Amino acid sequence: MEYGLVLAGGGVRGAYQIGVWKALKELKIKVSAVSGVSIGAVNGALFVQGSKTKAERLWNKIAIGDIISLPKEMENDENLFKVKNLMKIAKEIYSNNGLDMSPLENLLNEIVDEDKIRNSEIDFGIATFSLSEKSENYYFIKDIPYGKLTEYLMASACFPGFKARTIDEKKFIDGGVSNNMPINMLLEKGIENIIAIDVKGVGFYRTFNLAGKNVINIKCSRPQTGTFDFDRDGIRKSIQDGYYDCMKAFGKFSGVLYSFKARDYAAARRLYSKELIEGIEIAANIFGVNPYKLYTIDELVGAVMNEYFEYVRQHNGEISGGVFEKIKNAILLAKKNAVQLLVFPECALTGYPPRDIKSSSEVRFDLVEDCCKKLQELSDETGIALLVGTIYRTDQIYNRAILFQPNQPVWFYDKRALWGWDREHFAQGSCDGIFEIAGISVGVRICFEVRFPEYFRELYARKTDLNVVLFYDVSDVDDTGRYDLIKGHLQTRAVENVSVDSIHPYQTAPTAVFGKSGQILKECTRNQPELLIYDFEKTEDDFGETGRRTISDTLFFEGK
């Protein structure tokens, strides 16, 4: 089945459409035509030319300065329409007959490939409004003179208050003022299966006769960021919302405020009522459980309880929502199974900022010290060595792995490769992270360090027998691909100093192109003769390369 795709206007809320696009691609939904208005027209152009990666990169770094020329006193402000900005905006509009959109035009000239759009099998149309004629204007790609696509996209996206776009002596503004959901463009093409993506943007929504048509409406399930609020976290969440809402619309996921795999939800419905499940979702929302994650019902219940215990902790002095009791129970279970070394995750004792706590400075370090004393006592009593991740404070605050051994002084390792917000919350460690237990030399590394072979060559040079990596999590969402990348890192660290000389008559590694983040961009079919063709797009994004080099430059050791 083929669909027509309608993309409504809504400024920054258009990020939601990128999430829908991701879901449509996973669902292998075939689209024959796209109509869009305002930001929907821009996203639609990228959709038709097939530049999903380019669109994601654009939305991950876009700022208000990429859209309009800001007054000097407003530079780098994320939100155009904050109260403090209104007078400055009004002054700019009055002085210059509207805000200057030349940055957006420059951006569109860079990212829009008119030839690809004209040669695409997908038809493309945009809606705008003529100030000169006081009329709605609709243009499919065949109606737009060659070389002027960017101008017409600008005409569609001229939000009131921005400078009107003049084309052939006619002035145009944002088509959303008269029709923010141009379904009619597809109806006139005779398209009967339509996907309409509504980001609840500012504009006028017209009513059309949809009798006999199969229209799938995908609407934001949660309040979205402001129309011109370029908050990075808000944009990321909008994209995730779009993905989940689309999957729900096509029956792959279920849930109201949260998301579950359809099969898991159906199984839960056989045990619980729909009302009870929705009540759990409401409770999760009240306690602030992360909605940008794919859950089972049991996982959501567990998350609600954890947040509840965290609330209790904040009010009665317990550490991290009863987590110590969980650690104690794990130790007792390990004792029954004659375990010698028991390893817990990164920051297991305290939680990890900014997800569990806003800042490392919020940690009750007096409680951490108390728990460490209890852990040493448990190690003494059970005879088990315990390697526990925690935030720890001495002269500075560290992301630390502490080893408690029976009747021995504590040993510790502080994370050295500090990624992203790590650098805002932790100081960099300096120790090598090697200890010995029962005649076995053990190396310890923490999370992000798995990406750096340098840290593991240091261990191989010291001839460690076992290397342990503590992780907190690999993603805030149910991201199988990301897990596979992390697993690949671990496998590589395990074998990189081992020679493999077995040969088999099978193509286990077909020709492929990998992205900078490690994902497979395109791959040939295994054991089949095939020509791989990949349209390479140069990008200035460094995917953490600068930070990686900075971290690598701090590593000084001599191989043996």
Image (cartoon, helix red, strand yellow):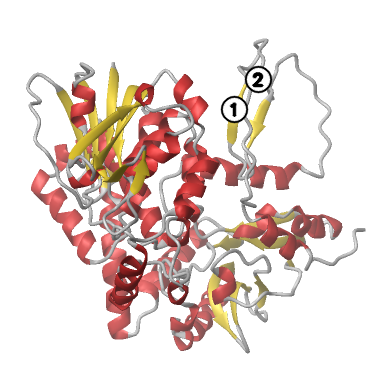
Pick the front one: 126 or 338? 126
- Residue visible at 50% across and 26% down? 116
Image disc number at residue 369: none
In space, the residues marked 2 and 1 are separated at their CA atoms by: 8 Å
Residue 427: image location, x then y, percent: 63, 78
Depicted 426 relative to depicted 224: above or below: below
> In the image as oriented, which residue stretches furthest toward the top?
529
- Residue visible at 22% across and 61% down? 285
Depicted 332 relative to depicted 535: above or below: below
Q: Are marks 2 and 1 in contact (CB under 8 Å)?
A: yes
Left or right, 243 with respect to 216, comes to right
Image disc number at residue 522: 1
Q: Inspect this view and state whether residue 253 appears.
A: no
Image quadrant containing the C terminus: bottom right
Image disc number at residue 532: 2
Amino acid of disc 2: Leu
Residue 107: image location, x then y, percent: 50, 48
Image quadrant containing the N terminus: top left
User: In which quadrant of the rendered view does residue 73 lie?
Assistant: bottom left
User: In which quadrant of the rendered view does residue 148 lie?
Assistant: top left
Count residues near mark 2 (Cα–Cα under 10 Å), then give few for <14, some for 14-19, many for 20+: few
Q: Kindly state the secondary structure of the residue where label 2 is placed.
A: loop
Left or right, 319 with respect to 106, comes to left
- Residue visible at 75% across and 59% down? 455
Residue 215: image location, x then y, percent: 17, 27
Pick the front one: 512 or 15? 15
Q: Inspect this view and state whether residue 318 appears.
A: yes
Left or right, 347 with respect to 231, comes to right
Amino acid of disc 1: Lys
Pick the front one: 65 or 212? 65
